[in-house]
Amino acid sequence: MKISVIGCGYLGAVHAASMAELGHEVVGIDVDAAKIDSLSSGRAPFFEPGLPETLKSALATGRLSFSTEFAAAAGAKVHFVAVGTPQKPGEYAADLSHVHAAVDALIPHLEDGDLVVGKSTVPVGTAAALATRMSVHSESVLLAWNPEFLREGFAIKDTISPDRLVYGVPAAEAGERATALLDEVYATALSNDTPRIVTDYATAELVKVAANAFLATKISFINAMAEIAEVSGADVTSLADAIGYDARIGRRFLNAGVGFGGGCLPKDIRAFSARAEELGRGESVAFLKEVDAINLRRRQRVVDLVKEEFGGQVYKKKVAVLGLAFKPDSDDIRDSPALDVAVQLHGLGAEVVATDPEAIDNSRKRHPQLLFTENVDTAVNRADAVVVLTEWKQFRSLDPVELGEKVDNKLIIDGRNCLDPAAWRAAGWTYRGMGRP
Ligand code: UDX
């Protein structure tokens, strides 16, 4: 099937490459010429394991191409809209200007019977409004909403073998046609028994934000328990293990630490709150404000732990920050708790030296005032404190004895509860975790 993917950011680039890998003929379109140049030559503009390989193999088959021209979408039967919906500056609401611009630019190139598929995360009600907007131009063009659940670091796998497929489609015959086209697109996943939920636009839009709101709530729940553990001497990691054995609760997403970040969870719960308020039901998701507040308090907790260890004053203390990305296997620093903590410590006068396997370039662009090094040994050299903020494998496997020889003061703050406290204490370190005694 011939497919166009509008927007070649994280979601769109992965989607385009994955659809070509599945055998479709795909053109990825983006207004950013630098991004298109990079993708056309098989280079991913961001770090995602497996993406460069998938891009190169799909480009080599001739099934994948990229363009800055919307006209390149002409002739495709299905058009995915995968542009960003960032948080509006100074507001909670999502900025939909890219979605509207993409659809407007696409409309002149659509033919009768084409299917436009929204993939972007949008406030509930967006698809219905877009369908009306499109119908002004053509009665016979279809719209479906097909939310994406990919996780950074697993993006290709999540796209090719998703947990589930959700189609938000119009009623009656138009819905049947949209469903049939989407089934053709996802034939490989469906042949592997991937569950498929066919529903209306509003439900499909809500599924995405509800899933992210639930995940964020789960993380903030365990971080709230960490706060209680901190004043009662309990250990939140044992607590998470114990409650996680209840299959109704489950152990995944119960890791207490410095909290969630990234381009999705924080902005999606805020946009959901804003949309619920617009709909007159703000109170239904008022708890999401608390989820956000708990999450932000955990960043402060790490800063406070460092301060506490130095009697309230971090001025001129040399602090090694290990981790800048919002999670491992990513170079993404959007709303990253790690980077936020590094910036806060720097703001308090600490001499911060930060390292990360992939996220230094992005961090330097945003915060040139910080000192960065590629090398853990250089970061920890003569440090007064070491703070682990992203649980990269190479940080989890650090040897406390070897590291102890490089620092001036053996203080480790484990912002991700990813180290073994007993091993670090045995090597003479003061170990401070999140919600651990
Ligand atoms: C998330 C959703 O998982 C995905 O389904 C959606 O499509 C996009 O948003 P992603 O942003 O890639 O994916 O990251 P995710 O793995 O969900 O982690 C989000 C944040 O939560 C990270 O900062 C991570 O460190 C944090 N986290 C996760 C915790 O603090 N504790 C946990 O137990 C799990």
Image (spheres, rainbow, N blue to C red):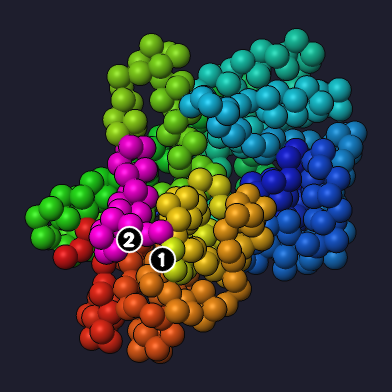
Does the CB distance between marks 2 and 1 fall below 8 Å? yes
Residue 216: % across, % down: 37, 43
Q: Which residues are magenta?
A: 291-315
Residue 153: % across, % down: 55, 61
Q: Which quarter shows the N terminus?
A: top right
Q: Which mark is residue 306?
A: 2
Tag 2's secondary structure?
A: helix
Q: Looking at numbered disc 1 in the image, what kind of residue is underneath it?
A: Lys
The vertical placement of 78 against 421, above or below, is above
Q: Nearer the viewer, residue 422 or 33?
A: 422
Residue 307: % across, % down: 31, 57
The vertical placement of 34 against 48, above or below, is above
Residue 306 shown in magenta? yes
Q: Residues within 10 Å of mark 1 (few under 14, many from 20)?
A: many
Q: Nearer the viewer, residue 173 or 49?
A: 49
Observer-side mark, 2 or 1, equals: 1
Note whether residue 29 is visible: no
Residue 228: % across, % down: 15, 50
Q: Is mark 2 within 8 Å of ligand 1?
A: no
Q: Residue at x 43, y 85 (%)?
A: 406
Looking at the image, residue 139 sits to the left or right of residue 307; the answer is: right
Tag 1's secondary structure?
A: loop
Q: Looking at numbered disc 2 in the image, what kind of residue is underneath it?
A: Val
Q: Which residue is mark 1?
A: 317
Q: Nearer the viewer, residue 250 or 220?
A: 220
Q: Which quarter shows the C terminus?
A: bottom left
Note whether residue 216 is visible: yes
